[in-house]
Image (tube, rainbow, N blue to C red):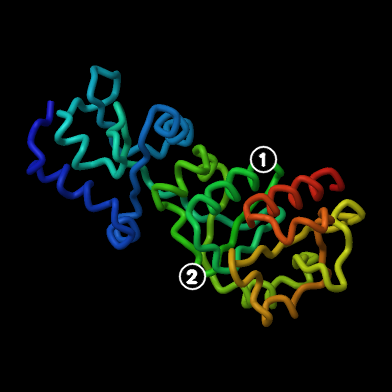
Amino acid sequence: MIESVNNEKIKYYAKLNQKKYRDEAKLFIVEGEHLVEEAKKRNLVEVIYSLEPLDGAIRVSEQVMSKLSALSTIPKVLAVVRMPEKREIKGNVLLLDDIQDPGNLGTIIRSAVAFGIDTIVASYNTVDFYNLKTIRSSEGMLFYVNLLKGDIEEFILNNKDKYTIYNTNVVGGIDVSDIEINTPFALIMGNEGAGVSARIQKLAHKNVYIPMNSKCESLNVAMATSIILYEFSKRR
């Protein structure tokens, strides 16, 4: 049992609550039984720490668990997990242009898995995939989609012949319920406040929109992404 917060491994892993150290080590922390189990299914677990006896886990004191945890209420179990390997893109793509809220990003990841997205390419200014709130909002689904950071404009320019590029815009747009999906697609979703940047919008092949009651001006980006991906999934 590890009882000291000055244990060298504990001090090292506690740093993973900061993006800088996550990126350097290619490791991150997941908290709670469900997320630990999802990481185990993907064979990505480096080490498990538990407050109670648990097969395959190292017991730690509450003080040590508090040192490792970023939650206000410490979990009974958490794991240090390896970041999934990046791989070749093999299917439809979701492009995220500067998403800032980690809860939105986590929900988007969850919906992407639910509706058959192979890869998410997020701009460099999009919030970290491995932010604690992102991980928890994804409900562990971040282990089931190819997550890449990159230049959205460059991706589109290099792949315009492979994918139909869809942007979200009422102006000149097609009702999402009327869309026909005949080729692999890449869907662009934009920043919570600013939407998709003008230069990125110009690169799309088609615009789509979600018809809404006039009393509602707009939808949360995570909700809008879920609706569009659901509609696209029905038409593939």
Mark 1 — residue?
114
Indicate the position of residue 181 as horizontal and vertical percent values: 86, 55
Q: Amino acid at mark 1?
A: Ala
Which is nearer the eye, 73 or 205?
73
Please identify the quadrant where the N terminus is shown: top left
Query: Based on the displayed image, in which of its 4 quarters is residue 178 positioned?
Result: bottom right
Q: Residue at coordinates 37% horizontally, 40% vertically from top-left?
A: 30
SS at mark 2 in the image: loop
Indicate the position of residue 151 as horizontal and vertical percent values: 56, 74
Q: Is residue 15 above or below residue 49?
A: below
Mark 2 — residue?
125
Mark linked to residue 201: none
Q: CA distance from mark 2 to mark 1?
A: 25 Å
SS at mark 1 in the image: helix
Q: Residue at coordinates 68% horizontally, 75% vertically from top-left?
A: 158
Which is nearer the eye, 175 or 139?
175
Q: Amino acid at mark 2?
A: Asn
Q: Residue at coordinates 23% horizontally, 24% vertically from top-left?
A: 51
The disc, 2 or 1, on the residue closer to the chain's N-terminal end is 1
Indicate the position of residue 149 as horizontal and vertical percent values: 51, 64
Report the side of 15 relative to 179 (left or right).
Answer: left
Q: Is residue 83 above or below residue 63?
A: below
User: Outermost residue toward the front?
Assistant: 215
Report the side of 55 relative to 229 (left or right).
Answer: left
Q: Residue at coordinates 16% horizontally, 36% vertically from top-left?
A: 64
Report the side of 91 relative to 5 (left or right).
Answer: right
**Label 1 Cα neighbours within 10 Å, binned few <14 / some 14-19 / many ≥20:** some
Report the side of 228 relative to 136 (left or right).
Answer: right
